Image: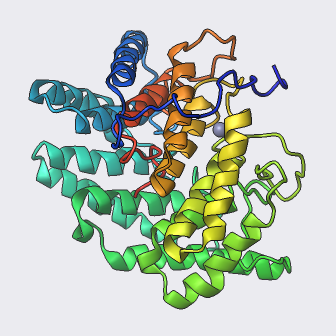
Amino acid sequence: MSSNREFDNPYPDFAPGREVFKPGTSELKDDIVKQLQENIVKLLKKLEDGLKGEVDWHDYSVYTGTTGIAFLYLHLMNSVHDTGQSKDYMKKAIWFIEKPLASLKGRRLSFMCGDLGPLALGAVLYKRVGMDRESKDLIKRVEKLHKDVIPLDNDLPDEFLFGRVGYLFSLLFIKKHLGEDAIDTAIVKKVVASVVKSGRHLAQKENRNSILMYMWHEKHYLGAAHGLSGILYMLLQAQEYLSAGDLKDLIKPSVDYIMALKFDSGNFPSSLSNSTDRLVHWCHGAPGVIHLAAVAYKVFGDEKYLQAARECGEVIWKRGLLQKGYGICHGVSGNAYAFLLLFQLTHEEKYAYRAVKFAEWCYDYGKHGCRTPDRPLSLFEGLAGTVYFLNDLLHPEQAAFPAFQLF
Ligand SMILES: [Zn+2]
């Protein structure tokens, strides 16, 4: 063990003779696919056995609750060809979302931890089963909530898990699945403008070097879940609702501000007040910031962002087998998405190989002596997220970090 945070990576790095693809293709070799499929079946059974016990319907979040389970079933449904199997997954997805939709608490406005998760996912699922009227009703409820999101004089943060860009994600998610016209574009523009205004306001007030700055719980976080990189990532996924001037003069310099904070290891600090190179999680550190580097490379075409993404990949390969477990938020599955992203950007087999090795680590789920998460079956902390990742790895070109990466 190299520290009390991660295990030493026991795998040799990619080299000739360790290919994972069939020659000349980006299709995984048959034996790797077979092993993946066997482990998906095994871990999905473990998950479903767990869910037969008591389900906590009070937690209906995507992050740790029932909507996250529904989210997994939508993903599984999209990847099977057998119509009977697909119908079964759809039934299960709807089962996990109907009860929450009937008893929303009206408290939080984000996709990940608030009412917007069940509302947005429900709209997509209902449309799929032909319940058009119900789907439209949910979309109306989503749109109506923009009035609570846009004002800057409330205590709503801007970050992804609980804040404004978590609402923005809900709008983009519906547009992606149900078409451009499914959401009023004027609302998306207003939310984007509000997030930008909020960031400019704080940066000016505090006289920061960055043009945009945000806070959550009194800290200037930098990671994907609560910080600047997650906010900029979501704004760049909504780039068509920003002007060319704002992209160039506000967003790009803010991305550069974060990139300049990189440690020599390739990792990133979790907040401005924390300068120790410790956490290598999606929520805090390189596995989250890599998503920003990747989208910045796609939007601005500047090689320096690809280089930053590659450096994130190196530290994740070295320190990404976390003692915290196998999950998406702060676990091995979430970290493995960094390699899938790098594979998609570069088409270098090395990165697909690394993702496969992290998957192999997950095959021994629960056998490394990791701490059991508070919500051991959930999408972001537990087993559902690992099943999601393994299933995504079957198609490395199309894989996308759940409930965060849209394109
Ligand atoms: Zn986390």
Taking the image as drawn, is residue 58 in sight? no
- The residue depicted at 64 percent of the width and 73 percent of the height is 153
Location of residue 206 (image quadrant):
bottom right
Relative height, residue 161 to residue 308 (above, below): above
Q: Residue 340's spot in the image, x, y percent?
A: 49, 44
Whereabouts is ligand 1, in terms of quadrant?
Answer: top right
At x 48%, y 81%, the residue is: 242
Q: 168 or 275: nearer the eye?
A: 275
> Can residue 6 be seen in the rendering of this structure?
yes
Answer above or below: position of 333 versus 310. Answer: above
Q: Is residue 15 left or right of residue 406?
A: right
Is 407 rendered above or below residue 98? below
* Residue closest to the far front: 16
Quadrant containing the N terminus is: top right
Give how far across and how far down residue 239 sits, in percent. Answer: 47, 75
Placement of the C terminus among the 4 image quadrants: bottom left
